[in-house]
Image: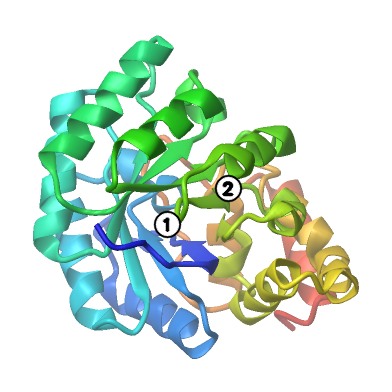
């Protein structure tokens, strides 16, 4: 399989809903246009930020098809296809491949708490079953079990179609270990906005980002500066948005980022249960910061 060359700002997209709870494709297309106009390199569809636990298999497949058709090769499309059941993960990944996505993002199995060997067997089974680039997604804060760096590297060396990892432990030494031991062409993406600049300085390939939903152009610049070693310029942008990065996680993602996008007029603020609107006090913190940054009036 040819090297997967995606680098830079990759937005983990929210899924907009109408008041009746159905997917709002009109608002979704506005979001896609926003990223296309501002230079975002790729988008993740139906990931954690997209409230994927509440989307049906058919809704996932429909989102993949719609995104591929609408973007029409103007940006990389990555489909979120993780499951804690290996057979289901293979099925979802095949659905995404059939829809024409460029790659899939596959989270470590959650709740089951597999051993490292079980984790390896899960991803190796998926890699053998499909012919599409696979990005591992390590987020033990959500799954309960890490994809240890040595397991990720073993998978990277053993399977040509395991092309990268989204490393979202917040641990920069994990990122360093992955960069140090990876085979040629294997991408390491930060999954944490707040250390993405530092990861890029070490040699990472960008970030699969929540902040990019709100300030796509400046997040593109932050990734570009930090990957090119322009540390002073990157540092200035980092500190400009440091407070907003924190506030976007003051409640469970994607609650704050959906509130921010609603304030920006991009979409209705609708969640699927068990997620719910922000507390008024936290919401005011987000609104105040958006005003301070001149993102809203």
| Mark closest to the chain's N terminus, 2 or 1 | 2
Residue drawn at 87 percent across, 64 percent down? 239
Viewer-side residue, 68 vs 155: 155
Q: Which residue is mark 2?
A: 191
Residue drawn at 29 percent across, 46 percent down? 160
Badge nearest the viewer, 2 or 1: 2
Judged from the image, the secondary structure of the residue bearing numbered disc 2 is: loop
Among the 4 quarters of the image, the one containing residue 136: top left
Please give the label number shown on residue 291: none
Up-down relation of residue 54 to residue 74 (above or below): above
Q: Position of residue 187 (x, y in %)?
A: 49, 53
Q: Are circles 2 and 1 on residues that touch, CB within 8 Å?
A: no
Residue drawn at 57 percent across, 60 percent down? 205
Quarter that holds the C terminus:
bottom right
Viewer-side residue, 32 vs 22: 32
Q: How many marks?
A: 2
Among the 4 quarters of the image, the one containing residue 227: bottom right
Q: Position of residue 132 (x, y in %)?
A: 21, 53
Q: Is residue 95 left or right of residue 197?
A: left
Judged from the image, the secondary structure of the residue bearing numbered disc 1 is: loop
Q: Which residue is mark 1?
A: 270
- Gap between marks 2 and 1 measured at Cα: 24 Å
Q: Position of residue 193 (x, y in %)?
A: 67, 54
Up-down relation of residue 291 to residue 167 (above or below): below
Can residue 77 be seen by looking at this rendering? yes
Up-down relation of residue 126 to residue 85 (above or below): below
Quarter that holds the N terminus:
bottom left
Viewer-side residue, 224 vs 257: 224
Dot 2, crowdedness within 10 Å: few (<14), some or many (≥20)?
A: many
């Amino acid at each position: 399989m040819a090297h997967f060359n995606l680098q830079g700002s990759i937005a983990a997209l929210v899924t907009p809903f109408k008041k009746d709870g159905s997917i709002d494709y009109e608002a979704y297309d506005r979001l896609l246009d926003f990223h296309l106009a501002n230079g975002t390199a790729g988008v993740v569809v139906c990931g954690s930020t997209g409230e994927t636990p509440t989307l049906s298999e058919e809704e996932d497949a429909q989102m993949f098809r719609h995104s591929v058709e609408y973007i029409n090769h103007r940006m990389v499309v990555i489909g979120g296809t993780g499951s804690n059941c290996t057979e289901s993960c293979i099925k979802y990944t095949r659905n995404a491949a059939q829809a024409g996505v460029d790659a899939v993002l596959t989270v470590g199995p959650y709740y089951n708490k597999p051993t490292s060997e079980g984790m390896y067997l899960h991803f190796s089974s998926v890699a053998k079953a499909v012919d599409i680039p696979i990005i591992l997604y390590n987020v033990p804060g959500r799954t309960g079990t890490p994809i240890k760096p040595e397991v990720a590297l073993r998978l990277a060396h053993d399977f040509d179609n395991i092309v990268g990892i989204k490393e979202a432990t917040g641990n920069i030494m994990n990122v360093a270990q992955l960069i140090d031991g990876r085979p040629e062409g294997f991408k390491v993406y930060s999954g944490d906005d707040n250390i993405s600049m530092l990861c890029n300085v070490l040699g990472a390939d960008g970030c699969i980002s929540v902040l990019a939903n709100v300030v796509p152009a400046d997040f593109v610049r932050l990734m570009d500066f930090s990957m090119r070693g322009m540390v002073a310029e990157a540092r200035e942008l980092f500190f400009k948005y440091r407070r907003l990065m924190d506030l976007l996680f003051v409640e469970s993602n994607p609650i704050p980022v959906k509130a921010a996008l609603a304030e920006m007029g991009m979409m209705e603020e609708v969640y699927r249960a068990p997620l719910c609107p922000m507390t008024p006090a936290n919401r005011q913190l987000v609104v105040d910061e958006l005003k301070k940054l001149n993102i809203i009036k």
